[in-house]
Image (tube, helix red, strand yellow):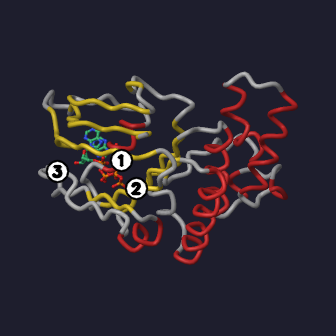
Amino acid sequence: TPEIVVENVSKRYKTAAGETTPALADVSLRVESGEFVTVIGPSGCGKTTLVRLIGGLETPTSGRLRTNGTPITGPGPDRAMVFQEYHLFPWLTVRENVEFGLVEQDIDESERADRVAEMLDLVGLSDRADAYPSELSGGMKQRVGLARALAVDPAVLLMDEPFGSVDAQTRRHLRGELLDIWAETGKTVLFVTHDIEEAVALSDRVLVLNGSPGWVRDRIRIDLDRP
Ligand code: ADP
Ligand code: ADP
């Protein structure tokens, strides 16, 4: 069954001048449960907008979005996001950052502790649980971002250029780790990048979002399905 369905979605942002600017035009796609799909496209083609729409952080101007058959009306614990700029809470430790979503979900303290320990083990950061984000390298920060997203046990992981702020060597390491975690957890992953090498290295199915600066004039063009 499809986990994510996007049907004829368009998005225009309001600008300061009271006009609107197009960010996505008539995009349709579906991602099956357990699939790892990468979306590539040049800067400005609407990748971040697409991820934010599926994450429920934006509403479409037209079209429909569904997750597991249910219309997307806002953020939900079934869809966790990982951002390029980490978006960790600087005043919280690694442990507290990973625990954050669990506190919101009203899960009791001992279960939370177990869950956090499990996630930190999964991303190889058990020994840095009491560190603050400022004490970590970029790669470590993104491991925390990933652990925080996975802690709430979402069905879908939405990743927006998650390795865009780390050096090339760390990026290759993180790719491998992400694929191992995907294989282990069976999550549905939608991964956005502008790097075709990264897209091909990560997934069997690559969706291409094509546009030109300021005006998204096209939609998904190539869909390299599994042989
Ligand atoms: P990237 O190309 O790395 O995805 P951008 O620089 O396009 O990132 O966008 C970074 C952030 O700024 C995003 O949250 C995006 O929604 C916002 N943003 C981008 N363009 C505009 C704009 N013209 N007006 C207001 N916010 C914008
Ligand atoms: P990408 O992630 O592919 O770089 P974005 O989704 O960030 O693309 O942006 C798509 C288009 O929408 C760009 O032209 C960008 O400037 C514009 N845009 C993005 N966010 C906003 C915003 N909050 N307000 C106005 N325009 C925006």
Left or right, residue 49 beside residue 19: right
Nearer to us of marks 3 and 2 is 2
Circle on res. 48: 1
Secondary structure beneath dot 2 equals: strand
**101 and 3: which one is in front?**
3
Which residue type does callout 1 highlight? Answer: Thr
Residue linked to disc 3: 214
Using the image, determine if residue 12 lies above or below residue 32.
Answer: above
x and y, in percent, of residue 183 in the image: 61, 59
**Quarter-wise, where is residue 167 in the image?**
bottom right
Secondary structure beneath dot 1 equals: helix
Q: Is mark 1 within 8 Å of ligand 2?
A: yes
- Look at 77% across and 58% down and name the residue there: 125
**Quarter-wise, where is residue 114 in the image?**
top right
Is there CB contact under 8 Å for labels 1 and 2? yes
Residue linked to disc 2: 192
Mark closer to the chain start, 1 or 3: 1
Mark closer to the chain start, 3 or 2: 2
Which residue type does callout 3 highlight? Answer: Gly
